[in-house]
Image (cartoon, grey):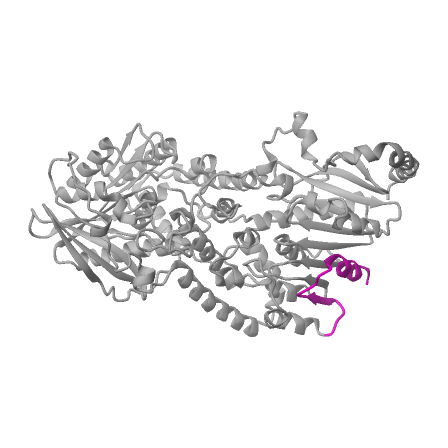
Amino acid sequence: MDNQLKKDMKRGAVLLLFLYAFVLPKAQEEKEDLLINNFWRYNGAMANGDWSNALYQHISTYAFSQINERSTFVGNLKTKSEWESRQADLKKIFAEIVGDFPEKTPLNPRITGTVKKEGFVVEKLYFESRPGYYVTAALFLPTAKKGKLPAIVYCCGHSVNGFKGYQKPILNLVKKGFIVLAFDPIGQGERIQYFDANGKTVFHPDHEHSYPGTQSFVSGRTPSNYFIWDGIRAVDYLISRKEVDPARIGITGRSGGGTQTAMIMAVDDRILAAAPECYISTYDKIFRTEAPQDAEQNLMYALKKGMDMGDFIEVRAPKPTLLVTTTHDFFSIQGARDTYNEAKKAYTAWGFPENLSMVEDDAGHASTPKNMMALHAFFQKHLNNPGDPKIEDIELLTEKELTVTPTGQAITSLQTETLFTLNKQYAEELSEKLQSKRQDTPDFYKQIAQEAKSLSGYSEPELSKEFIFSGRLWRDACAIEKYLVKSAGSYHLPVLRFLTENNNGHCILLLDDQGKASAAAKGGLAEQLAKKGYQVIVPDLSGFGELGGGFNYGDAIIKDVPLNVWYAGILTHKSPLAIRVEEIKIIVDFIKTLDAPHSITGIGCGVLASDLLHAVVINKEFNQIALINPLYSYRSIVQEKEYHPKYVMSTPAGVIANYDMPDLVTAISPLKICMLNPVNSLDQPIDNPIFDQTYRDAKQKYGQSSNWTVSCNERDVFSRLAQWIGQ
């Protein structure tokens, strides 16, 4: 303990007698100010932006760097051969980040009804994209033209009622003489996955995608894999029909349908003409405006691997492509223009600049008359189906007329697989392979640290010695010091330091997922430990406390958890987990710089138990650790349909195939560890038999050592923790 603090404490002891007698009775009624950034914010020192949104801003710096690197590379491409080489590379990148598709199994299509209208017929049908995974759809067949006709796959945006909500653009194409196959994306129309007790969907389609899509990422499979495969199988169905000309296949769709269009057109060479609507922009503009959107829009490590939205177009050059855009869309129109200008260079190098076009209208996120006419003209030209592009007057079919299944839902009519069930099966396959890897790899646990670094995107942080002392509070005989510690980003980490005069020379780093204010509350864990003589350091890591709560937009905030931020980490391969592990290393270095302790104990509470455990595995900075209410297994996230997404924020994508929480614990053996009241991803306590089975290898590695302490039903956590620390 420094001499100045000792003098201050002695002086404080005298003052406390006076304060307790005359001043504090009234002052205690006022709320204690444990904020640190507050002072600097009000005094103009927030030049680096809103620290409550520091995590997203920090990930964005990686995104912008990766985007700029790609832009420089692509900007230097000039010749056709250079673009051909780029296309070959892109196909490999797409294959890596989308993942392997399953083998094509029988579609087993079934037509469930036919509706005849003036000028066209609708066949209601479903097919199996994967075994037991049913896609509800409708085939719209014009009756005025004969012979093999051009056909268009119509991809739906985020309407609750699926393709039924897009009849105007669909029927206008049909009246132009195009066969149109429109299908429900998973989570929409008759493919809803999540219901309440009354049979009503509990989610908007965005969350119907992102909730199970997040689990897919945890397993290591980009959820767009499922969406793209549905589109590929839709093309398979189209070309199986005798009425369809397989050489004249098109695809289009707006919003979420624009996403599907862009991705399907990039991987399916059978698609001749494609027109994504109200989606194409640039990732630079996405990060600066709406942030990464729902799960299937984000490809695993896309930015890290040098991808941007222009690549959806450039990989298919010089096939005809139309960008359908609006100037007031939340997908930035400037991004669309930038993408068009870049892709135009590829088409020009190929010698077909006329095959890439763009239409824009001064409107919001909608299909406008101007854009619809341009869309009609585009397909009429490139699918060789000439005619008038004008918009037709149409009469919409009723929901009942277009309902495919008896109950109106595939899950009740057909007992279909869902994204959740398919991913759960996939995760189980990965878990079995992982178990074999544990048994067959002698150095498996020695490799865990490198696996954790690689998977999370961890990089060694620069250990800046910059920290700002920001004031001191007194609580009884306990001093509470405030610090701002420079992070690896443009923000500082708010840190509280608890000290008493009877300091025993040992330090505790306390990480609380409720924020430092919770741990540092009067009578709370930090104060109780400090009164026992420990120096207690309580920081806010990025995403928590003063460094959290700022991200309140985007379409994947589920149960108040900003999964959009996690998706940003997936695009950049810089996970929130990696950033916080780096922050923990910086704080440990700060502790050693401030006052070299005899030992450092780490305590991680709730979600942050995972971050602490990773920090120990990667950097080995602690003498002992305690995990309070930790998630007991990453597998739990993919096993539970109604998991709590907060645990995902401390989970690296792809972890299921590589390691689990018990592996991390086994890897740090024989380090002294205490685990109290572990929980599953439902935020429910688990019992001893489940824990013992899951942690069998870890228990065996620790043996009868006193370094192993576990309690699954501890009532007095502090007493048990204090006893354990003092052992």
Q: In which quarter of the image is the C terminus?
A: bottom right
Toward the top, the furthest residue is 44
Q: Position of residue 302 (x, y in %)?
A: 44, 48
- Residue 724 sits inside the magenta stretch: yes
Residues shaded magenta: 704-727
For the point 32% across and 52% down, the residue is 185
Q: Is residue 667 left or right of residue 568?
A: right
Question: Number of numbered discs present?
Answer: 0
Q: Where is residue 600 in the image (x, y as percent from the top left)?
A: 77, 54
- Answer above or below: position of 663 versus 559: below
Q: Using the rendered view, name the quadrant where residue 20 is placed.
A: top right
For the point 7% across and 52% down, the residue is 147
Q: In this view, does 24 lie to the left or right of 276?
A: right
Q: Where is residue 463 in the image (x, y as percent from the top left)?
A: 69, 43
Q: Where is residue 514 in the image (x, y as percent from the top left)?
A: 64, 47
In front of the other: 597 or 639 = 639
In front of the other: 117 or 138 = 117
